[in-house]
Image: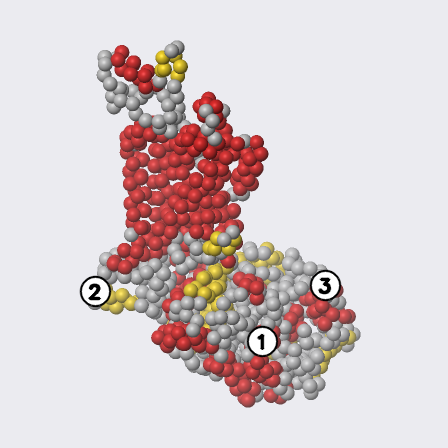
Amino acid sequence: MGAPPPATSISFGGGHRRPVATGNQEFTLDTAAKLAAQEGGGAQVQGRSPWALAGRRLRRNYVALASLGVFLLVVVSCLLAPVYASHVAHRGANDANLTGYIHENGKTIPVISNGGSRVLPDGTVIVIPAGQPIGPQWGAAGGQYVLGADQLGRDLAVRLLYGGENSLRVGLLSAAISTIVSVLLALLAGYFGGVVDWILSRVFDLIWAFPVVLLGIALGTALSINGFHHFGIHLAAGDLWIPTAVIAFVFIPYIARPLRGQVLALREKEFVEAAVAQGAGPLRIMLTELLPNIASTVLVLFSLIVANAILTEVGLSFLGAGVQPPNASWGTLIADGQSWLATDPWFSMLPGIFIAISVLSLNIFGDGLRDALDPRAKVRIER
Amino acid sequence: MRTKRGVILAAVVATGLVLVVSACGGGGGGTTTTGPSTSGKTFAQLKVVWGTTDYMDPGLSYRLESWQLFQDVYMGLVVKAHVSCQTGDCTKILPGLAESLPTSNSAGTDYKFTLRKGLKYSNGEPIKASDFAFSIARDFKLNSPGIGFYSNIVGIDGCEAAPTSCTPSSITGITSDDKAGTIEIKLKTPESDFLYVLSIPFSSLVPPSTPLTDTENPPPPASGPYYISSYKPSRSFVLKRNPNWKKNELGTSVPNGNPDEIVGLMTDDVDRSAQLVQSGQYMYDENLLPTTRLAALKQKYASQIRFYPTPSTYYFFMNESKAPFNSLQARQAVNYAVDRSALVKLRGGLGLTTQNFLPPSYPQYKKINPYPYNLAKAKQLVQQSGTKGDHVNLYTIGDVPFDKSAGEYLQGVLQSLGYNVQIHELSGDNYFTIIGNQATKADIGFTDWFEDYPYPTDWFRILLDGDTITQTHNNNYGLVDFKDVNKEIARLAALPPSEALSAKTNAAWAAVDNTLQTKYAATVPYLNGLLTSFFSSKMDMSCDVFTDSQDDPAQMCMK
């Protein structure tokens, strides 16, 4: 709106301004803006930070904002799982109910169909098939079994929400951890170079050499047997921190490698040399000079890696190497529903739909964020 | 033995058991039973859908899916009767390649067999008396899961110590005379189940030209009415009539078979399996019908489906060597807290609730019901035991729906009793190896057992005898070790042959069952499994012969 953005050369950091010597007058970019404004009739040009500009571009991208809204709606719904379980379904996520009944329109219906077998004296075997879980009741059973029950009589809607909470928690946390660790390693490798860079780069290469899912399965399976009990850290076998840590670990090179490249390039820039000349130490340079300049890339990578982390969690849990039973995740729910595909396909379809919505909305928002932060950037996750 | 899962038999079977009187004791050449009739029912091709097999070698395979085929392919000196358990005594041992049941000395340690004359393998080689010793030595060479069954043969120690150097001549307890066709087997001590052991596939005869390695393509030559002409692991097999099989060659013991050829497609996908028979592309489904579709299938194909009880017990083991289940009250609590009818529901109704360890088809079975479902009492017992809040490592199979659900059900039960439960869901491929390793320290878990042969030693000796516990490949997952029970099992095994199947002995075995469950709450048996047989509409159901755990494909016929 109004004046075009000032012709800044770089810096997302906000507030780091470099003076430009023009004869005996100190000439800054703000000075240039003021002069330009005077030439244009005296109207004051309001300077906007790159963040503000990015925010403005993002606000104009309605599809990205709608996607963010959808994702937040899913997150909020899943966070409300305990409320739904206690006030609507009146049943916990892991409460089996093989022999229970619900009451609907004056009728008593078993949650899991009754039946059994007996052998007659002549050896004939009579079998009455049993074990069929109740289907979706929508609202007819007073909030119980809205989406039906699973094979153990557990409320599917409750498990879907709790499963979502676990999947999103693991996905978001692992992406956050992976991003933080990757940024630190990239700064170290890029700034110091030499041996440090060589060692860290080889570590990235080593992790990169394994397919994400295979490495995740190997680590997840190993840790799901006895947990992790090293370096003073004690994680029980079913602890949610295990898939979180595994996924965070496997994604490190996917964030760290592109960031390292950026840091390597930035390290040679004049403003870094200037900082060094002014006596700034490595830590200060990394945090105040380099980090602000890679922040936009970090944000975009984070938004994209979250979607990948959620998908990886779902994959690992589906294969038994992620969230451990009886806890649900969207991946375990899909796995549980496999044997019911012919009769009760919604067992697997519902978590699948939630995964698709979450990942799609995150990806669209991530693309929007990338476009907003740097329309020229070509940040993408390569797997 | 377990279905669908390879299992290594580690427990050494019987070192001092007695003879089964009715199964041996001289003569018997004229033994008859309700013999199979196959006349006038032959047809060109039977197409079946089958569960995947582990091996197609009688020296290596330890799965029901393979043994079901072997009953018409590989013969031992004796064979189990090929008759339906509903219409005859399917547990009866009959002469196989031997012309009669063996003669034995009064102590039951020396068996003498004579081979039938003029027998040939499917490749044309003559069946010789010395092939028996070769076949047993080959089992050792292959490190077969069945070698534990032969530990009571005189001179077998060298083979046990160094299986790969085992030779027929090193087994001094087996002597044979090819010219006379006689085989003599000497045992260290009497062994009641020895004839049953001789009827299982590990004891079947293969020619000396058979390689001393896993031989699957082609499988070893056959001695029965069919030979395996083609085998593609996990994909398909073809059985054809043995060209060297003479009609009624083994008398009434083994049927000649109806189909000229049996073509099998192998899959463990039960939905696909049932669909292939529904569509009429295949004539018989060996897999269990999918429990999720059982009601619909039963309604639509009622006349084409049969249900059969099997000599199997599904149970939870409890580790009695460590807390919390070294406490009797804790074990009793779990027994009270498990609702067995709920577990039958989980199996789609395909089970009969039980609290016995022995299946009901055994003459030694006497029904007990010491733990009616009572959650309140269970909680009280846990409180009294002082184990509430203890950490429990629960193991189950994660890739078999029922096993997984049963484990998760038990987890809920244990949590409701106040235990802190960690469930470990493992792949069925290595589950029993892992829980059979004492280093795993499994506290409780899922397991099941299908008989190898119908005598209580196959249950108590292998699964619940403290004297057969091993560090690895252990089948006594709960480390059940009660001195009085161990002693009683040994005593019963050492009874004179004349008392092996007497009413008194049967009652004593029943008492062992009762003591283990009532006095010690050693395990949590909850159901005896049912199996399904699903035929296409082209098949004549009246020909279906279901022996104790399996349909006999050779006796199937068309309308």
Q: Nearer the viewer, mark 3 or mark 1?
A: 1
Q: CA distance from mark 3 to mark 1?
A: 29 Å
View extreme (front): residue: A279
- Disc 2 marks which amino acid? Asn
Q: Which residue is mark 1?
A: B466
Tag 2, which secondary structure? loop
**Can the viewer see residue B432?**
no
- Quick one: A239 or B63, which is closer to the camera? A239
Q: Which class describes the residues within 10 Å of circle 1: few (<14), some (14-19), or many (20+)?
A: many
Q: Which residue is mark 3?
A: B164
Q: How many numbered discs?
A: 3
- Quick one: B55 or B45, which is closer to the camera? B55
Residue located 46% across and 81% down the image: B518
- Disc 3 marks which amino acid? Thr
Q: Nearer the viewer, mark 2 or mark 3?
A: 3
Q: Quadrant of residue A86?
A: bottom left
Residue located 21% across and 67% down the image: A106
- Split into 4 quadrants, where in the image is the N terminus of chain A? top left
Tag 1, which secondary structure? helix
Residue A105 — which label?
2
Tag 3, which secondary structure? helix
- Quick one: A302 or A69, which is closer to the camera? A302
Q: CA distance from mark 2 to mark 3?
A: 71 Å
Residue located 63% across and 81% down the image: B17
Mark sitting earlier along the chain (3/1): 3
Q: What is the x, y in percent for residue B247?
A: 64, 71
